[in-house]
Amino acid sequence: MTPPRSTLRTDAQRNRERLIATAAEAFASGRAISLDAIAKRAGVGNATLYRHFPTREDLVEEVYRDQIRPLREDARTLLATKPPAQALHAWMLRFADWAGERRGICEALVAMSASGRFGTGPVCDEVQQVLAMVLEAGATAGELRSDIDPVEVGGILAGLLSVAGAPEQRPQLNRMLDVVVDGLRLR
């Protein structure tokens, strides 16, 4: 991905912002769209798009960067009101709802997890931090194992969402999350 926003030339920053805004609009439409079409709609060339966002996952992550932050507060609230294992399960369901409302995010998370890049973008990084917070609370409470890497749990969550992330699959996802959380319990 391109350098932080503050180090870009003014025109490069403007192009980057147009690409993000155009992609956000395209993703919100619910219709599939190619990266080439996003570049064209944004009024930039393909090379400009790929210079800023080498992969579709990079673009998807940037579009949803600011939208994921409220889920951290959700995790804190859940931890304040539920035991850590229940909070983890409930937060993963909330994340599934959040991801289900945003076109392309589940596919991006699965692709990043499969390529070993989970935790390297803004959305994945936020998910990883939230999972670390909840897992640490669970380990401290003696409820969850302390040897679990949040990146691995994020990869599992991405995989579950790829097979049972649709709203009509919520009962199946709930059962799958029961299995995951049970496997994370301290024995």
Image (cartoon, helix red, strand yellow):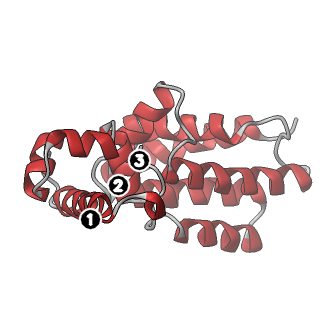
* Position of residue 71 in the picture relative to residue 135 (left or right): left
Quadrant of the image for the C terminus?
top right
> Marks 1 and 3: CB-CB under 8 Å?
no
Q: What type is the residue that disc 3 sits on?
A: Thr
Query: Can you give x and y, in whole percent of width and height, for residue 25 in the image?
Result: 19, 63
Q: Which residue is mark 1?
A: 14
Q: What type is the residue that disc 1 sits on?
A: Arg
Q: What type is the residue that disc 2 sits on?
A: Gly
* Position of residue 72 in the picture relative to residue 41 (left or right): right
Q: Earlier in the sequence, mark 1 or mark 3?
A: 3
Helix, strand or loop at mark 3: loop
Q: Residue at x 64, y 38 (%)?
A: 151
Q: Residues within 10 Å of mark 1 (few under 14, many from 20)?
A: few
* Position of residue 128 in the picture relative to residue 147 (left or right): left
Q: Is residue 59 above or below residue 5?
A: above
In which quadrant of the rendered view does residue 66 lie? bottom left
Helix, strand or loop at mark 1: helix
Q: Earlier in the sequence, mark 2 or mark 1?
A: 1
Q: 169 and 56: which one is in front?
A: 56
Helix, strand or loop at mark 2: helix
Query: Can you give x and y, in whole percent of width and height, for residue 41 in the image?
Result: 8, 56
> Marks 2 and 1: CB-CB under 8 Å?
no
Q: Residues within 10 Å of mark 3 (few under 14, many from 20)?
A: some
Q: Which residue is mark 3?
A: 2
Cα separation, mark 3 vs mark 2, equals 27 Å
Q: 176 and 15: which one is in front?
A: 15
Q: Which mark is residue 100?
A: 2
Q: Is residue 180 above or below residue 92?
A: above
